[in-house]
Structures are given as C-alpha cells and as structure tokens.
Amino acid sequence: MQAFRRLPDPVAVRLALFYTAYFAVAGIMLPYWPAWLESRGLDPVTIGAVLAVGFWIKLAAHPAMAAIADASGALRGLTVLLAGGALVVYAAFGMADQVWHYLVLAGLAGITFQSIMPLGEALALAEVKARRLDYGRIRISGSLSFMAAAALCGWAVDHYRADAVLPLALAALVGLVVATTALPRRTVEARRPWSWAAAGRLAIDRRFLAFIAAAGAAQASHCVFYGFGTIAWRRIGFDDTVIGMLWTLGVVAEIGLFWMAGRLGRFGSAPFLLTLAGIGAMVRWPLTAIADTVAMAAALQVLHALTFGAAHLGAMRFLQDNAPPGLEATAQALYYALVTGVLMGTFMPLAGLLYEAEGMAAYHAMGALGVVTLAATAVLVRLGRPAATPG
C-alpha cells in the first residue's frame, strides 16, 4: 500500500509533460534562434528588432488571451489552439526572405507560442494550490527538457550548422501540441465575475507594479545573454557543443534551486527570492563581460540559479499568494505581458545596439538592472501586504 501512495499525482505528471514539451522548444530557440537568424543574413540590430517584436506583441496578446481564459474558463482548449498556431508560424519562418517577413512572423509567434506559458502557468498554479502539489518539482521537468534540448541542438549545430535549428524546433512544437491536449481539464473558477475594471485595478495596484519592476528588471538583465550570448561565445572561439553545455550548466543550477523550492520555508518568500535575483545579476553580468575562458564562463553560468531561477520562483510565489480570485490567468498574463513584453521588448533592441557597439562589454549594463531589482524589492517590502484583494 505504501508503494501505491508514493505514485506521483497523475495531474502533476500531466503538468510535468506540458513543461517538458514547452521547454524543449525553448531549449532550442533561446540559445540558437539568434544564430539561425544570423545564418539567414540578419545583422545584430535587426536580430534585436525581430526578437523585440515578439516581446512587444505580448502587451496586447497576453491580456487578451487571459481575458478569454478567465471569462470562459477554457484554459486547456485555448492552449491547444495556440500550440497548433505556433507550429504553423514557425514553419513559415523557413520561407521568409525579407526583413518584414521575419518581423511579421515574430509578432505572430508572440501571439501564439509566447502566449502559451502564462495560460499554462495559471492552470498549473490553480492545480498546485488545489492539490497541494510542489510547483518547483513539477517545473524541474521543464528545466531538464531545456537542458537536453540545448545540448542536442548545440551538437546538431556543431555538425550541421545553424540550418538544423528550425527542423528541431518544429519537431519539438509537434510534441508541444500533443502535450497541451493532455493538460488537465480543470477550469479556473471565476469566483467573482471577470471584468475589465477588476483587471485594470490589478494592473495599477502599487504592490503589483513594484513586483513587476523587481521581477522585470531581473529578467530583462538577461537580454544581452539571450540575444547574443551564443553569438558572442562563438566569436570568442567556443564550439557549439561547448556552448550547448554552457547553457545546460545554467539550467542544472536552476534545477537545484527548483528542487529545493518546497523546503525553503521563510526563505521562499517572493521578496527574499527577488533579492537573491538582484544580487545575482549584479555579480553575474559584469563578470560575464570579461569571461573569455570556458572555465570562467561555466562558473558564472551557475548564477543562472539566482538571476533566472530565484526571479521566476519569486514571481510565481507572489502571483500564487496575491492573484485575485477569478483573475488568476489575467494576473499571469499581465506579468508576462509587462515583464517579457514591455521590459524585454524595450531592452532587447537596446541589447542589439549595445552588443554591436561594445561587444561583450554590453553585459555591464545588464548588471545595473540588478540594482533596480533590489530597489524595487525594497519598495515591495515597504508597501507590505494589501488590506483587501482588488476585484
């Protein structure tokens, strides 16, 4: 009987499969999509612009998708539809041959692929809260998948050049379509009627905005790395297999933090985790600017546990504790729209300009965003908990 009790919750398994599939795509795209764009003849400034379009479109796409999800409760069905759309959009990238083609398709990718995660996270957090599941351990499956996909893609690019990136991404997207169909059918219950007014009150809440500034600065500090980390390492002389392993190492560190998330106790609060993220950014990025050996780059990749892992866990903890009833998907969507939309959309083209002008020295500007994270977190702590839930 004890053995049966230890079997994983079937809902946790289905959520883990979703994270596995989604981050298999991300593990291919995040490290190697800029290299694929470069292989198509795009320069750093244009690459930054193409990447930024996908971020900016989220400002409209994410809240719109969340409004549909929260009002109808159709999280699973909408996620499946978006996954299928993403597969079509990325297949079309193979036929692009003008800059405007890439810009339009990047916008469509922002509407489809990049809108999947806030809906999936909203569904996952609803299940985590209802079933008392360990979010960190479910999310580890995504980190492991990212790690494996990055390593595989690095090997493929090393042997078959950047042309291998798109076919691998399309194969992973097929897996994502399948995984979304297996998501739980649970709907986020609208305990209060959804309304634009309630969503608007959440969007201008001072604590929510302080949280967005803190988490957003931490995530935006990755812009040079996400946009040009692989390109920069290739120019230093690292081969693509090594680069894939460096990306993998960062995720291994992230996994360690996620595994411990359920045991952090008071150290697992949103302010504490965001503070760790700010400190990590202040240390990691200025040193990355001068890291010209594999050993030094590898040591700094361990700090991904703080700059991304702690920032993400802190954000999810804040949203789990503070999302108003009936606005779970909306809160997630606003977070992703403002952080990975507005802030990343602003800093990504700046990262392109900085990298073209300064090369590796562009990382110094990313370290300054760690200071912003610490300052905004201090404001969040000062504001304390809300007296009443907006809604």
Image (tube, helix red, strand yellow):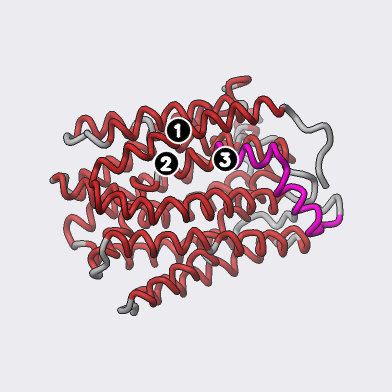
Q: Is residue 64 above or below residue 318?
A: below
Magenta segment boundaries in residue numbering: 193-214
Number of residues whose C-alpha sits closer than 10 Å to that of mark 1, classed few (under 14), some (14–19) or many (20 or more): many
Secondary structure, mark 3, is: helix
Q: Is residue 215 above or below residue 68?
A: above
- Amino acid carrying label 3: it is Ala
Measuring 32% from the left and 37% from the top, which residue is drawn there?
364
Number of residues whose C-alpha sits closer than 10 Å to that of mark 2, classed few (under 14), some (14–19) or many (20 or more): many
Number of the label disc, if any, that sits on residue 370: 1
Measuring 38% from the left and 72% from the top, which residue is drawn there?
102
Find disc 3 in the rendering and name its residue. 213
Q: Is residue 380 left or right of residue 104?
A: right
Mark 2–mark 1 CB contact (< 8 Å): yes
Number of the label disc, if any, that sits on residue 69: none
Q: Is residue 112 visible?
A: yes
Count the labels in the image.
3
- Amino acid carrying label 2: it is Ser
Q: Position of residue 164 (x, y in %)?
A: 26, 64
Q: Is residue 72 left or right of residue 275?
A: right
Q: Is residue 180 left or right of residue 27?
A: right
Q: CA distance from mark 3 to mark 1?
A: 11 Å
Number of the label disc, if any, that sits on residue 221: 2
Secondary structure, mark 1, is: helix
Q: CA distance from mark 2 to mark 3?
A: 12 Å
Mark 3–mark 1 CB contact (< 8 Å): no
Measuring 52% from the left and 26% from the top, which residue is drawn there?
275
